[in-house]
Amino acid sequence: MDEKRAQWGSKLGFILAAAGSAVGLGNIWKFPGKAFEGGGGAFLLMYLLIVPLIGMPAMLSELAVGRASQANVVDSFRRLGHKGYTWVGWMGWAVAFLITCYYSHVGGWVLRYVVSYAVEPGKVYGDPLGYFYGMLGYAPASGVTFLPWAALVFAFLFMAVCAFVIIRGVQGGIEKFNKIGMPALFLILVVLLIRAATLPGSGEGLKYMFSIDAGKVTPQTFLIALSQAFYSLSLGMSIMVTYGSYLPKEENIAKNTFLVCTMDTLVAVIAGFIVIPAVFATLGPDGVGKGGGFAFVSLAGVFEHTPGGAFFGFLFYLLLLFAALTSTVSLIEGIVAFLTERMRWKRTPTTVVTCAAMFLIGCLYTCSQAAFPLKGVWFDFANGVTFPPLCDAMEFLTDRIMIPLCALGTCVFVGWSWKPESAVAEAERCGVKFRLVKAYGFLIKFAAPAAIVVILAVSLFTGTTLS
Ligand code: PFF
């Protein structure tokens, strides 16, 4: 069966696909907002320490598990002789499924905004909040709600593109798509960085990003940075295990880990240096902290006040679109790989059926944003049982519980059962010595699990959202 497994066609193909998975809405949409909340420099500094100390060992472990087992995420732990960890694989698979349901819908909103900036930027500027909520089926001025057809239609289109790429397979679809998407993304990023840096008044934002506010150097900021790092690096889901399983033996996974983490962090930091100075220059600091809708609502103010703004707005959402597409594709690949291998289902119908199911579940997510009062159930020790909007409950479940649990399971598996030496041996199969054996062993056995346990405990006991 092994020789039938798909493999990456080239080194670059894998690196771009893994970076494509990691670089997503998390980097460009979430990171700047978190960096602002965390006091700019203070957050940045912590983030830059967390990536090498916790993110890199965790990613190396996931890639090693995938490549050593040559299996999809559910079967990988069993293949390595540890049946007791199969639940980690199931959890990874399930969280990838749930996340895709809503990640693809947010991708659809982004696609909607690409079109909006191309054809009707004036409408977006005229009433940014009304435009955003209008897409989601709610008119803030009159309080009327209606079917959010615009969001749903674009989410459908977004999902259809992803399904198409997945059906084409690992080399023909995912790899080819990322080879175009990732360089395009870097190019757009550079153009926008130059634009932001040359806006009059952007210096204030730059200063904010470089200054360290001692009051923000807190455990809370640390935890926000930590969970952002996991999300941004695509850890704690089936992705890096699945992508690792398509890697040939002669590939250096340690070097790849370093490259992918570096690229992901670079994009996040650059996005921070685009968004924060641009928002400071046009709207002032108050423009940043507008929660989830910030990338859609506040940024309209930025583009309205920027010469050539509609064009740069279009470019910005195109950038977000590429990032969201490559990440969604990686999530779906993890889901489909399991179904085709374990259930022996065919790739095309499996992709169509799972994507259709995820799109439909995602419709509940979009509809519960503003249009309809659909509720979910939640529990934490601080607030007891609550009934948040369904969309929030879905995110709580994945971000607060499932991702940390799956990441913890993987670290404990590699640190204590499979043993760091096995992961190191896997890393050294390419013939290059891995020099950080001791540090890696310590980080994966103690530091990473301890940090994840703290994230889990804080969200369960205090009810705080950290991701
Ligand atoms: N890393 C992606 C981001 O930063 O947006 C999100 C993501 C994609 C997480 C794929 C996990 C994953 F498997």
Image (cartoon, rainbow, N blue to C red):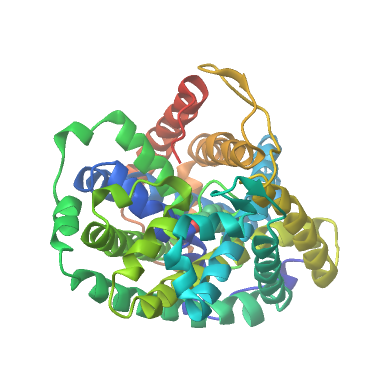
- Residue located 33% across and 31% down the image: 220
Specify whether 247 is left or right of 252: right
* Residue 356 or residue 91, whichever sits in front: 356
Q: Is residue 341 visible?
A: no
- Residue located 23% across and 57% down the image: 280
- Compared to residue 84, the image places residue 56 above or below, namely below
* Residue 230 or residue 372, whichever sits in front: 372
- Residue located 70% across and 67% down the image: 153
* Residue 246 or residue 323, whichever sits in front: 323
Outermost residue to the front: 142
Total numbered labels placed on residues in the image: 0
Give coordinates of residue 281: x percent, y percent: 21, 61
Give coordinates of residue 224: x percent, y percent: 37, 39
- Compared to residue 93, the image places residue 195 above or below, namely below
Give coordinates of residue 402: x percent, y percent: 60, 38
Q: Is residue 97 visible?
A: yes
* Residue 104 or residue 343, whichever sits in front: 104
- Residue located 68% across and 57% down the image: 148
Specify whether 161 is left or right of 118: right
Give coordinates of residue 369: x percent, y percent: 61, 46
Quarter of the image with the N terminus is bottom right
Specify whether 110 is left or right of 126: right
Residue 295 occupies quadrant: bottom left
